[in-house]
Amino acid sequence: MSKIDDVVSLVENGKRKLVPAAVQEALDDGADPVELLNGMIGAMDIVGEKFKRNEIFVPEMLIAAKAMKAGVDVLKPLLADEGAEDLGTVVIGTVYGDLHDIGKNLVAMMIESAGFTVIDLGVDVPVENFVNSVTENENVKIVAVSALLTTTMPAMKETVEALNAAPYRKDIKVMVGGAPITQEFADEIGADCFTVDAASAAQAAKALVA
Ligand code: B1M
């Protein structure tokens, strides 16, 4: 088993305390940080599949999520691009009713690395918090909205529609993403941009303010 496989297996099995050392070991062994990150995302897909088959339950999913977070913390400085120019502020959050934050945190991390100041509203964010964040913070260029559940897609629709109705709308861009979100849905609700993953979200954010 490769060192990356070790990390994948530890995340999948929720071995939070062992993950940071295993990630460091893989890095010391020459593993690519992006490959390691993708391995951990793959581990979460396996966890999701097991959940769907009723082989594991919510507590195990949560423990695996904590293990992944511990691994991402080790990778973070390696994925960040320090010293990039200041491109403005991005407000990000997960819609109300939705507690998933790993993907949102990765998007925040990559966007910050690309040179933006990131204000993270967290998870289960009420519509009005997204809407008010634009006037309560300086130099907001983008509002980025994440949703991981088909049942919280309506909350994303509501959030984007509220942003679209705000007087400042022409001055900001609205980005959306998350596993159930599609380009078609993004168009339907009037978002400016949809991306499938954190790396493309950062690239798209740069393009939106260029
Ligand atoms: Co939940 N969960 N979960 N869960 N969970 C999923 C999403 C699910 C697909 C599992 C499954 O059934 N296979 C399923 C959703 C089914 C659906 O709606 N179609 C599901 C369910 C059903 C639930 C509950 C309802 C379970 C229950 O209680 N019965 C419940 C809901 C709670 C709630 O939110 N109200 C629930 C709870 C949880 C935990 C809290 C236990 C935990 C989350 C912990 C946390 O996030 N801190 C959890 C987890 C861990 C998962 C899985 C296993 C992993 C999610 C994850 O972190 N993936 C997940 C299965 C899966 O995704 N394969 C599952 C890794 C992460 C990097 O990927 O978040 O997709 P992701 O982010 C990606 C892209 O989507 C994109 O970039 C990232 C990659 O670079 N992206 C964006 C995300 N946001 C973006 C924003 C952008 C652009 C790109 O622009 C703004």
Image (spheres, rainbow, N blue to C red):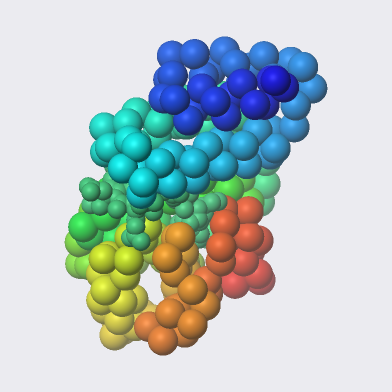
Residue at 26% in and 32% down:
59
The vertical placement of 186 against 83, above or below, is below
Q: Quadrant of residue 13?
A: top left
Please provide percent x and percent y for residue 118: 46, 50
Residue at 32% in and 35% down:
56
| In-image side of 54 versus 5 (left or right) | left
Please provide percent x and percent y for residue 68: 47, 31
Q: Quadrant of residue 161?
A: bottom left
Quarter the C terminus occupies:
bottom right
Quarter the N terminus occupies:
top right
| Residue closest to the eye, 82 or 126 | 126
Please provide percent x and percent y for residue 72: 53, 31
The vertical placement of 73 against 141, above or below, is above
| In-image side of 107 versus 54 (left or right) | right
Residue at 49% in and 82% down:
184
| In-image side of 147 versus 78 (left or right) | left
The vertical placement of 89 against 82, above or below, is below
Q: Residue reaching furthest right?
A: 30
